[in-house]
Image (cartoon, coloured by chain):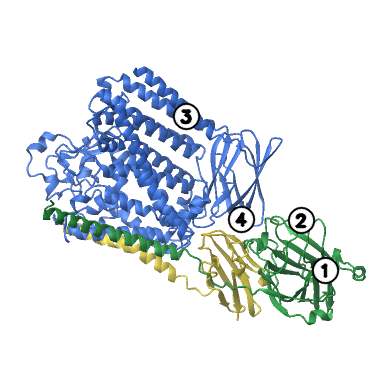
Chain colours: A blue, B green, C yellow
């Protein structure tokens, strides 16, 4: 019976995969074909190409006749590396042989307006073999994972992919120099101060930049290209809330609360020192703050003074919240990036935990929580002696300084083990799986899709909406975006959860439990997709960074000699492969953990296996959708 | 039945929620308002070009630029700027006077401009004058590089306008009727239906362009009352070695054919 | 220990205030009469700044043309045959010349940069 349903499922999925693959193979090639030369007339104007998707056949000689509809534009084709510019009034002929199959982005290479960095079009050279291969790999991975689920032994359940023990830890702080470093009062504060210096330069640069082009502005580039990409590709996926360790935002607030910058001052926060309301001690506030902030991404990712405005508001907010509420309330419950950092940190390969819980059981008072002369009680209001999830731990290392038994450790661990933590060991109302985290996980999917479509997609009309060309268009965008992220995606997920509950046959589990429990499947996949999207940002825009480093304040300096560097994307040929590998890795982790979630949600193993199938199919379909979005 | 503490708790939560979300929303809206206004166009140094109004007449319109008829028509002074979008750029500023007229069959313009020397030879360069008309909804870039073939150029050159044509009933070859078909390209219309003649007197050129009001041929721009197409003029001074893009050109303005 | 933390505090404040001071210092250094800064912007975003430049006859002057706008511009003064070529956003170009004849000279942008490109004009007054 099981094998039968397996085969059926496999067939259905295979058919679906083939349909999706062939759907994207349009038979409508662009332009006109004469012999084996295809000529396509393309016009470019702010901020799109027309036609925005050019389809040719592999092996054809392509001739693109590019004209401008308004100002000087450029053309840079990924992988092929062909670059051209077109002034208004001329026809630029771009010729090449389409000897590589796949989908290649091309984008503008001459600053032409605010949304210039998002001026993209796609060249599809058919057959899009690597997309098809990607789909097949996704299907194989998913079905293979399903087969393993049914064959799994008890022992292999304790190991990720059957190889890495879930309990494996490598303690970084077993090395004395590391431990001593963590105990120094000036660590990591000195790096926070360093970051504050850079932050001031960012603020000045962004303010001075006014309404000039963001891609040439130090503030905009360092924040949205360098910092954002580091955050999404390395910091969060690998190191968890590492950025929080060195973030400059709370510096002044901490100083005011504590009365000292580095040494140990007041233990009780100066200021009103209020406690954050219980009802909001979750990810809801930060999910809303982040989401509302993204309404304005058409401004602050490209216009310097908008970046200044956003950063100024956030840092002022940080200071004000520090004066009203205690400790790091801002970092926990208000900071816009706290949401995904907190949630995605559960996927990271680093953690701060106690070494030996037995020591903590008999130790009173709990110095790590109340503080002593060596350091502050946990500013993130966690209980370090009981810490079992990364979500609300900001890696500030105070607990290393306060613990008289040297019982804190920084461990390297397998990716994602926190995802299996349903609640704290003590029955804690706050720090557990809940709808807030489910919605953060789900809304990050909607945000990613909209970001990708706008910033790296061929749809100029979408960019017009986002950049508020008309108020009506913008209102439409806000409405549609909100509905997509808060209604459609969660709604679809609710449906799948319902199917999962039905399939399991478990009568006692609630739909909410299924919904919330399985929402963590979207964490590894989400982390991977955001990392892939961010990779596409740095490889293409990275060449602007040396330029802004040479002249951060736009006064004509040339500190590194790179002030006149041009636009030079790199490794764009490798990008699709890197992104697909990331997607497969994310899916692999999602599947590995997903089945374990099923085991936690449903009563019996059989119910878990049955309930898992709809969710697995959903994750497979979602991955195919992502692949299509990025490569199709 | 709900206890009062429950209701109080609910009220407190609502109050806290408002205290959190209202400032957030206010901030978001304020940010939006500021950025929206910063990104709107704020024109500096831009003036609305006055339309060129031409009147209806019942009489015949002469091709002769020096005919008495033209002296009786209202003139509009239009300033020409150096062409500044494609190389070779223009270098001269000049003023021209334009008169226009139309009857039931034809539409005509008389252009008057100062020129120190009469250059009728192809070498060094001939003096020339042109009229450019495009549909009312054309984009601004159409002024320089109309790309969709919807604009017409009537290009008169002094070297094409020779004595023998003055006595002929048509001096069609003194002018080329062209459509703009892409940046830097102009294609002659299949049949040329514009007539033009130029006369030089007292240091001034007077050039008349005439076309039948309704032109059936493909590519010719439709002209008639109410259409209000956009019109501009260009002048080349041969003595200053002006040709092709090196010219003076006026900013597009509406052509209003007044019904009186 | 008190000294150390105070020192840290002072260093931090300097670090925060330093860049702000540096920028204002740079700005005032550019008040040299023989070098003029000219900003090129599309007419819907401010046009030339300043739109009228005054220089002395017979005195060499360098006009530093900066493009803080989001599109490509250029500087062209036909009467004195001055041209910078295309100035991409963020770029700076200079023209140096010595005006001999007094008068008013037209300068303009020569790259189609906006629907109002034809209005991107200014006047150089030689006294």
| SS type, badge 2 | loop
Q: Which residue is mark 2?
A: B218
Q: Which residue is mark 1?
A: B196
Q: How many residues crowd mark 4 within 10 Å: few (<14), some (14–19), many (20+)?
A: many
- In three-dimensional space, the C-alpha distance between marks 4 and 1, rounded to whole angstroms, equals 33 Å
| SS type, badge 4 | loop
Q: Pointer 3 indicates a residue of which chain?
A: A
- Give the mark nearer the N terminus: 3 vs 4: 3
Task: Give the mark toward the camera: 4 or 1.
Answer: 1
Query: Compared with residue A519, is residue B189 higher up or lower down, i.e. above or below?
Result: below
Q: Residue A256's x, y, as percent?
A: 20, 60
Q: Which mark is residue A69?
A: 4
Q: Pointer 1 indicates a residue of which chain?
A: B
- Place residue A89 in its image quadrant: bottom right
Residue A338 in the figure: left or right of residue B145:
left
Q: Which residue is mark 3?
A: A17
């Amino acid at each position: 019976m099981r094998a039968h349903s397996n085969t059926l499922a496999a067939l259905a999925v295979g058919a679906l995969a083939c349909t999706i693959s062939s759907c994207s193979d349009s038979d409508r090639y662009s332009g006109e074909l004469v012999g084996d030369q295809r000529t396509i007339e393309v016009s470019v104007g702010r901020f799109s190409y027309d036609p925005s998707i050019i389809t040719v056949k592999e092996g054809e000689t392509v001739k693109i006749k590019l004209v401008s509809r308004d100002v000087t534009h450029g053309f840079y084709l990924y992988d092929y590396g062909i670059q051209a510019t077109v002034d208004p009034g001329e026809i630029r002929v771009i010729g090449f042989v389409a000897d590589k199959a796949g989908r290649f982005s091309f984008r503008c290479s001459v600053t032409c307006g605010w949304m210039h960095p998002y001026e993209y079009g796609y060249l599809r050279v058919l057959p899009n073999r690597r997309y098809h291969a990607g789909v097949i790999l996704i299907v194989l991975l998913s079905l293979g994972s399903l087969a393993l689920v049914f064959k799994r032994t008890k022992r292999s359940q304790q190991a990720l992919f059957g190889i890495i023990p879930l309990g494996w830890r490598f303690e970084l702080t077993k090395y004395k120099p590391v431990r001593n470093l963590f105990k120094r009062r000036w660590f990591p504060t000195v790096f926070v101060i360093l970051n504050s210096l850079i932050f001031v330069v960012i603020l000045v640069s962004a303010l001075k930049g006014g309404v000039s082009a963001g891609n040439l502005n130090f503030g905009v580039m360092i924040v949205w290209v360098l910092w954002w990409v580091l955050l999404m590709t390395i910091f969060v996926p690998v190191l968890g809330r590492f950025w929080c360790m060195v973030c400059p935002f709370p510096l002044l607030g901490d100083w005011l609360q504590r009365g000292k910058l580095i040494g140990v001052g007041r233990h009780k926060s100066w200021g009103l020192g209020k406690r954050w309301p219980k009802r909001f001690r979750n990810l809801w506030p930060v999910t809303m703050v982040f989401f509302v902030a993204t309404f304005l991404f058409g401004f602050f990712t490209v216009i310097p003074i908008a970046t200044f405005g956003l950063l100024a508001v956030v840092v002022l907010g940080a200071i004000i919240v520090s004066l009203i509420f205690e400790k790091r309330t801002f970092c926990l419950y208000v900071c816009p990036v706290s949401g995904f950092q907190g949630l995605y940190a559960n996927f990271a390969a680093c953690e701060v935990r106690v070494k030996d819980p037995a020591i903590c059981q008999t130790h009173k008072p709990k110095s790590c929580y109340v503080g002593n002369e060596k350091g502050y009680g946990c500013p993130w209001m966690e209980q370090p002696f009981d810490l079992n999830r990364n979500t609300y731990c900001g890696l500030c290392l105070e607990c290393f300084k306060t613990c008289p038994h040297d019982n804190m450790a920084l461990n390297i661990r397998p990716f994602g083990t926190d995802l299996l933590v349903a609640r704290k060991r003590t029955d804690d109302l706050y720090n557990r799986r809940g709808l807030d985290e489910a919605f953060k996980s789900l809304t990050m999917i909607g945000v990613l899709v909209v970001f990708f479509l706008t910033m790296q997609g061929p749809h100029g009309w979408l960019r017009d909406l986002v950049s508020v060309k008309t108020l009506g268009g913008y209102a439409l965008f806000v409405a549609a975006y909100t509905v997509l992220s808060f209604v459609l995606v969660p709604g679809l997920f609710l449906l799948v959860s319902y199917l999962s509950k039905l399939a399991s046959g478990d009568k006692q589990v609630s739909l909410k439990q299924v919904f919330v429990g399985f929402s963590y499947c979207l964490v590894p996949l989400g982390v991977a997709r955001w990392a892939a999207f961010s990779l596409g940002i740095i490889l293409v825009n990275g060449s602007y960074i040396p330029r802004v480093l040479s002249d951060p304040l736009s006064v004509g300096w040339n500190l590194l000699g790179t002030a006149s560097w041009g636009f030079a994307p790199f490794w764009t040929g490798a990008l699709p492969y890197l992104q697909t590998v990331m997607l497969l890795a994310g899916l692999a982790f999602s599947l590995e953990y997903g089945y374990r979630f099923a085991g936690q949600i449903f009563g019996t193993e059989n119910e878990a296996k049955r309930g898992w199938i709809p969710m697995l199919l959903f994750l497979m379909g979602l991955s195919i959708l992502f692949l299509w979005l990025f490569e199709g | 039945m709900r206890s009062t503490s429950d209701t109080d708790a609910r009220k407190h939560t609502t109050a806290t929620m408002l205290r959190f979300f209202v400032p957030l929303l206010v901030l978001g809206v304020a940010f939006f308002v500021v950025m929206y206004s910063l990104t709107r166009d704020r024109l500096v140094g831009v003036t609305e070009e006055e339309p060129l109004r031409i009147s209806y007449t019942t009489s015949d319109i002469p091709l002769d630029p020096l005919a008495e008829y033209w002296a009786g028509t209202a003139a509009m002074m239009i300033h020409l700027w150096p062409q500044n979008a494609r190389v070779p750029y223009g270098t001269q500023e000049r003023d021209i006077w334009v008169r226009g007229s139309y009857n039931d069959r034809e539409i005509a313009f008389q252009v008057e401009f100062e020129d120190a020397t009469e250059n009728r030879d192809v070498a060094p360069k001939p003096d020339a004058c042109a009229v450019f008309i495009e549909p009312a909804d054309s984009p601004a870039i159409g002024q320089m590089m109309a790309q969709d073939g919807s604009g017409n150029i009537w290009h008169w050159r002094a070297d094409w306008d020779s004595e023998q044509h003055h006595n002929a009933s048509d001096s069609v070859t003194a002018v080329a009727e062209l459509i703009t078909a892409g940046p830097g390209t102009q294609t002659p219309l299949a049949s040329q239906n514009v007539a033009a003649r130029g006369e030089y007197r007292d240091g001034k050129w007077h050039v008349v362009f005439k076309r039948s009001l309704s032109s059936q041929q493909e590519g010719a721009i439709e002209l008639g009352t109410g259409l209000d197409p956009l019109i501009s003029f260009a002048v080349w001074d041969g003595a200053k070695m002006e040709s092709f893009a090196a010219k003076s050109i006026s900013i597009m303005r509406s052509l209003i054919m007044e019904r009186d | 220990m008190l000294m150390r933390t105070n020192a840290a505090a002072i260093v931090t404040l300097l670090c925060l205030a330093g860049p702000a001071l540096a920028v204002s210092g740079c700005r005032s250094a550019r008040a040299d009469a023989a070098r003029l800064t000219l900003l090129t912007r599309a007419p819907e975003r401010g046009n030339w700044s300043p739109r009228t430049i005054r220089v002395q006859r017979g005195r060499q002057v360098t006009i530093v043309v900066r493009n803080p706008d989001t599109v490509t511009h250029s500087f062209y003064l036909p009467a004195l045959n001055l041209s910078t070529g295309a100035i991409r956003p963020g770029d700076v170009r200079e023209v140096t010349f010595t005006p001999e004849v007094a008068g008013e000279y037209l300068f303009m942008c020569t790259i189609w940069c906006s629907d109002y490109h034809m209005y991107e004009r200014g006047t150089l007054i030689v006294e």
